[in-house]
């Protein structure tokens, strides 16, 4: 009889979004006249920029001729896109990253889940708490995390680094030395960013400890402040300790189109072994490349017109984030995030935990957000609102909350 990978059986159910959906459905059934506004979504809502649409159409039309037809894409990505990324996302910021250190893929979710495959099972991971759940769950599936304690909602072999108001949502160096450190800035869910100086501390630490940092920069397009790095490679020494994950999803609204990239510098080694070579082998074996038309769309993100149109979209979401941030502050809430991020992270009123506040907002303001405890134990007592709705709905929702 076959056996299943019983690491999967260790995973607790992912109740967060299904519980939210159930609660909202029950509320709607009981209150059919209520106009619910959803500020819990992590998906973008604005249409794709015209310059990107134009590139998509052109690439589709190319497929109608024998000369223009494209079959399998090169599994590491087309050179035109890798070179464009190297120039615009790295050279432009003084980072020495070559086009062939960039691996094009269909998502930062899959890359962040799959990257752990190139590391030994006895490596210990460290994650921020609260955290984007994919980092931990993918390591659970691989069998790297020990046993789960439902009471504390933590795994025995994972190092958790609390990120709360007490440390300005920036993790402190852990007491126990990890082998793999997951960092995500600007952060989902807290919406807080890390300064270059703070990130340099992590790079120095990783180099000294012989650890690797997996740096998720999916929200870098939302950075507005000067001292916040758009890439970990702006820090000295990062090329010998860091892998960077980037995505077109939140930058250019590609959540449906699917396009991302991962950077692994050739200098990043374990003894003589380049992690770049391992990931290239893994990518080549398990992945047949992001579609040509989507890679052409990605290239158009960096055209003059594309950059201008996308800057407008980001500004639209920023306007929502500011409205949420300022409105909640006016209403007396303690708020974080929202400045370098589409996420606003608020402290729930003293007598309410994350889920109680969820029910309160749903019932009293008909607004849906995400309970912070769903992202980890240190998220308890916090709540996430996102700037990805329409401006009109955002204003309406926040004005309702202000009136409570
Ligand atoms: N990384 C973080 C931190 C995210 O919040 C998300 C999506 O919400 C992703 C990665 C997923 O990116 P992609 O759409 O490229 O898979």
Image: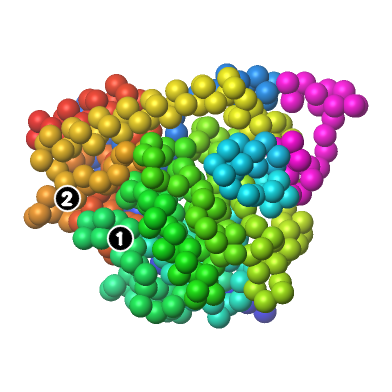
Give whichever of 8, 33 is nearer the camera: 8
Please state the extent of the stretch shown in magenta in the rendering: 58-81
Residue 307 visible in the picture: yes
* In this view, the mark in front (1 or 2): 1
Residue 301, percent from left and from top: 59, 29
Residue 72, percent from left and from top: 81, 42
Q: Residue at x 35, y 25 (%)?
A: 390
Q: Residue furthest right?
A: 66
Q: Residue at x 65, y 38 (%)?
A: 87
Name the residue tied to disc 1. 163
* In the displayed structure image, the side of residue 328 where residue 15 appears, left or right: right
Q: Is tag 1's residue or tag 2's residue first in the polypeptide sequence?
A: 1
Numbered disc total: 2
Q: Secondary structure at mark 2?
A: loop
Q: Residue at x 25, y 60 (%)?
A: 167
Give whichever of 136, 263 is nearer the camera: 263
Decide: few, some or many residues near mark 1? Use Cα within 10 Å; few <14, some 14-19, many ≥20: many
* In the displayed structure image, the side of residue 121 where residue 340 appears, left or right: left
Viewport quadrant of the N terminus: bottom right
Name the residue tied to disc 2. 348
Decide: few, some or many residues near mark 2? Use Cα within 10 Å; few <14, some 14-19, many ≥20: many
Q: Marks 1 and 2, how far apart in space? A: 16 Å
Q: Quadrant of residue 69?
A: top right
Viewport quadrant of the C terminus: top left
Placement of 332 over or under 232, stated as above or below: above
Residue 37, percent from left and from top: 28, 31
Placement of 392 over or under 329, stated as above or below: above
Q: Quadrant of residue 362?
A: top left
Residue 109 visible in the picture: no
């Amino acid at each position: 009889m076959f056996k299943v990978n019983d690491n999967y059986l260790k995973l607790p159910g992912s109740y967060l979004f299904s519980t939210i959906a159930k609660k909202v459905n029950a509320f709607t059934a009981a209150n059919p006249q209520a106009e619910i506004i959803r500020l819990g979504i992590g998906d973008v809502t604005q249409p794709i920029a015209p310059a990107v649409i134009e590139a998509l159409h052109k690439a589709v039309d190319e497929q109608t001729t024998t000369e223009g037809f494209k079959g399998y894409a090169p599994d590491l990505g087309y050179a035109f896109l890798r070179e464009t990324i190297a120039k615009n996302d790295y050279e432009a910021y003084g980072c020495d990253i070559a086009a062939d250190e960039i691996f094009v893929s269909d998502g930062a979710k899959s890359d962040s889940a799959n990257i752990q495959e190139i590391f030994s099972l006895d490596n210990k991971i460290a994650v921020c708490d609260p955290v984007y759940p994919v980092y931990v769950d993918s390591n659970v599936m691989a069998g790297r995390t020990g046993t789960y304690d439902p009471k504390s909602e933590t795994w025995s072999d994972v190092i958790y680094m609390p990120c709360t108001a007490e440390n300005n949502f920036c993790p402190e160096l852990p007491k126990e030395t990890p082998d793999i450190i997951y960092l995500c800035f600007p952060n989902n869910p807290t919406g807080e960013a890390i300064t270059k100086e703070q990130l340099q501390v992590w790079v120095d630490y990783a180099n000294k400890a012989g650890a690797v940092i997996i740096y998720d920069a999916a929200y870098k397009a939302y950075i507005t402040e000067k001292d916040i790095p758009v890439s970990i490679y702006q820090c000295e020494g990062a090329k010998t300790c860091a892998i960077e994950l980037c995505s077109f999803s939140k930058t250019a609204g590609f959540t449906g189109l699917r396009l991302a990239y991962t950077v692994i510098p050739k200098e990043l080694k374990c003894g003589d072994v380049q992690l770049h070579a391992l990931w290239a082998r893994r990518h080549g074996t398990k992945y047949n490349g992001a579609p040509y038309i989507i890679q052409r769309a990605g290239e158009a993100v960096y055209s003059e017109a594309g950059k201008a149109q996308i800057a407008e979209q980001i500004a639209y979401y920023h306007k929502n984030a500011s409205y949420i941030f300022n409105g909640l502050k006016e209403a007396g809430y303690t708020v974080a995030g929202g400045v370098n991020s589409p996420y606003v992270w608020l402290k729930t009123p003293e007598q309410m935990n994350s889920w109680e506040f969820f029910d309160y907002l749903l019932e009293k303001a008909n607004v849906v957000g995400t309970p912070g405890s769903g992202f980890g134990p240190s998220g308890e007592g916090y709540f996430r609102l996102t700037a990805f709705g329409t401006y009109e709905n955002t204003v309406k929702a926040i004005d309702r909350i202000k009136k409570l």
